[in-house]
Image: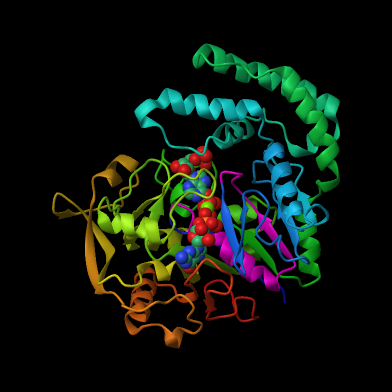
């Protein structure tokens, strides 16, 4: 019996999804990205060797695993080429194992220019996007004027359509943002070279997945960003432009929702955020700096410092429900080693009063005061520990409390960046692992 497992982030991204996907794909035939684009930065560390992936699924370092980019992903072909080349230089052969859906929207240079022009125009209200053209590419998809990957098979007709789109983008760049237009020659040259490069990798992703399932292969769906960056459920407008939640694993790849068996929610043992927007448990003090320093909290895509704070169980619990998370993975437990006390946000208040509804608007979330529960820390290193029994008692109590607050069992614990610094407490690929039942 094959298992279909979704791995996604429960906070604002960078929870350590890439590491967990790499670990679990040992048991998989295929790994599928289903949303986002190269705004993602997923870090894998194997025997001390670091690989950062943006668009290529995090199963690529396992030579037998098929890597799939589903229709929900916006693809920047130039970024993908440079990622493939970096992998090749490291001795990996990604091309023969990579399949890209023909329905993936293509990110053009003008999308990047528009993303950056819009951010500049927003001034102090900027979202703090990665500046990779993600938002404008999704806008064009929804407006039904975007270029899709399959169109690269017919470069002449693709160029004709891209030229129309570029006219529109350049109008906005010049007239709305007083910015430089993007030259048609550049886009024509790029489309011709992308066509030669990518046509062999384009394939019917829904069909590929179906074939793997018929052969009883396990499939892993790799989320990017995090639940709180979801365009609908996140801290709008400080979000990304795709659905990052579990339902998108189905719509963004071409399987039905009943095909998903296990949803693993990955959470950091504390919280981080890159870019602007509300962050109730953010620490502007020495502890915040300590978490940033010990957790090496710098964005894997832009290198920006990540904002740090205590674990927010109010948001995490909601995120677990939104995704039907039935298995939790807690990462970066080691970063909390040695703290005398640790806070967990268990509720919100405004002006000393409890809230009567969840603050779904970013402006309402901006003004909440976290209600903290303090728990004792542990004065022992957790890095290098291989069994849960060897963890310090207070570390186990902390994990138990997170599990209780989110009402989901903690089944994977990560205590370091390396693949081997991970404890897997339940085999999610075993036949008894299914949605709702543990
Ligand atoms: P992703 O976007 O969710 O894949 O996460 P990122 O790769 O952007 O950020 C996670 C960072 O934490 C990376 O630098 C990882 O190498 C690192 N990391 C992952 N798990 C652990 C852990 O358990 N402990 C420590 N100290 N670092 C970790
Ligand atoms: P992974 O997959 C953390 C954030 C940006 C910004 C907002 C919108 O590595 O977890 P965008 O460029 O998507 O329009 O930016 O979303 N953001 C991320 N933050 N991790 C990510 O990906 C992110 N991808 C986008 O910082 O606040
Ligand atoms: Mg990341």
Asked whether the viewer can see residue 77, the reply is yes
Return the x and y of residue 307 as percentages of the image width and height. 37, 49
| Residue in the picture at 64% in, 76% down | 429
| Residue in the picture at 69% in, 50% down | 70
Return the x and y of residue 295 as percentages of the image width and height. 42, 60
Q: How is the image coloured?
A: rainbow
As for residue 25 lying within the magenta part, the answer is yes
As for residue 187 lying within the magenta part, the answer is no
| Residue in the picture at 14% in, 49% down | 351
Q: Which residues are magenta?
A: 12-39
| Residue in the picture at 55% in, 80% down | 426
Q: Residue 275 appears in which quarter of the rendering?
A: top left
Between 383 and 332, the one nearer to me in the picture: 383
Between 306 and 114, the one nearer to me in the picture: 306
Seen in the picture, residue 156 relative to 141 is either above or below; the reply is above
| Residue projecting furthest to the bottom | 389
Asked whether the viewer can see residue 16, the reply is no
Total number of numbered discs in the rendering: 0
Q: Residue 38 appears in which quarter of the rendering?
A: top right
Return the x and y of residue 200 as percentages of the image width and height. 86, 45
Between 122 and 365, the one nearer to me in the picture: 122
- Left of 86 or right of it: where is 178? left
């Amino acid at each position: 019996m094959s298992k279909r497992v979704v791995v996604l982030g429960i906070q604002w991204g960078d929870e350590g999804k890439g590491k967990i996907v790499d670990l679990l794909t040992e048991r998989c035939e295929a790994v599928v990205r289903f949303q986002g684009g190269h705004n993602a930065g997923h870090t894998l560390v194997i025997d001390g060797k670091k690989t950062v992936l943006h668009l290529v699924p995090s199963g690529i370092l396992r030579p037998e695993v098929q890597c799939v980019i589903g229709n929900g992903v916006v693809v920047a072909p130039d970024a993908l080429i440079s990622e493939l080349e970096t992998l090749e230089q490291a001795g990996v052969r990604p091309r023969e194992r990579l399949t890209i859906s023909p329905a993936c929207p293509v990110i053009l240079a003008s999308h990047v220019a528009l993303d950056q022009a819009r951010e500049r125009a927003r001034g102090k209200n900027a979202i703090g996007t990665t500046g990779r053209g993600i938002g404008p590419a999704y806008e064009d998809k929804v407006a039904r004027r975007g270029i899709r990957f399959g169109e690269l098979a017919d470069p002449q007709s693709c160029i004709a359509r891209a030229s129309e789109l570029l006219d529109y983008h350049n109008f906005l760049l010049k007239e709305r943002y007083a910015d430089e237009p993007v030259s048609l020659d550049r886009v024509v040259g790029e489309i011709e070279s992308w066509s030669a490069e990518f046509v062999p990798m384009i394939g019917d992703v829904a069909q590929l997945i179906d074939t793997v399932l018929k052969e009883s292969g396990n499939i892993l769906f790799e989320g990017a960003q995090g639940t709180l960056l979801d365009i609908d459920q996140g801290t709008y407008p400080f979000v990304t432009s795709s659905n990052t939640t579990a339902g998108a694993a189905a719509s963004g790849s071409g399987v039905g929702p009943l095909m998903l068996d296990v949803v693993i929610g990955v959470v950091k043992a504390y919280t981080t955020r890159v870019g602007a927007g509300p962050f109730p448990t953010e620490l502007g003090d020495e502890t915040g700096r300590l978490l940033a320093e010990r957790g090496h909290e710098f964005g894997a895509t832009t290198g920006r410092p990540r904002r740090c704070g205590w674990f927010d169980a109010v948001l995490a619990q909601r995120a677990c429900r939104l995704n039907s998370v039935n298995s939790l993975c807690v990462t970066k437990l080691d970063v909390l080693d040695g703290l005398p006390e640790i806070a967990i946000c268990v509720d919100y208040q405004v002006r000393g009063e409890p809230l009567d509804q969840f603050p779904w608007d970013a402006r309402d979330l901006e003004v909440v005061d976290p209600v903290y529960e303090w728990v004792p820390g542990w004065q022992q290193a957790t890095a290098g520990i291989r069994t849960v029994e060897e963890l310090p008692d207070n570390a186990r109590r902390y994990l138990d409390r997170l599990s209780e607050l989110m009402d989901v069992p903690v089944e994977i614990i990560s205590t370091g960046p390396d693949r081997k610094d991970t404890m897997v407490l339940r085999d999610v690929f075993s036949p008894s692992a299914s949605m709702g039942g543990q």
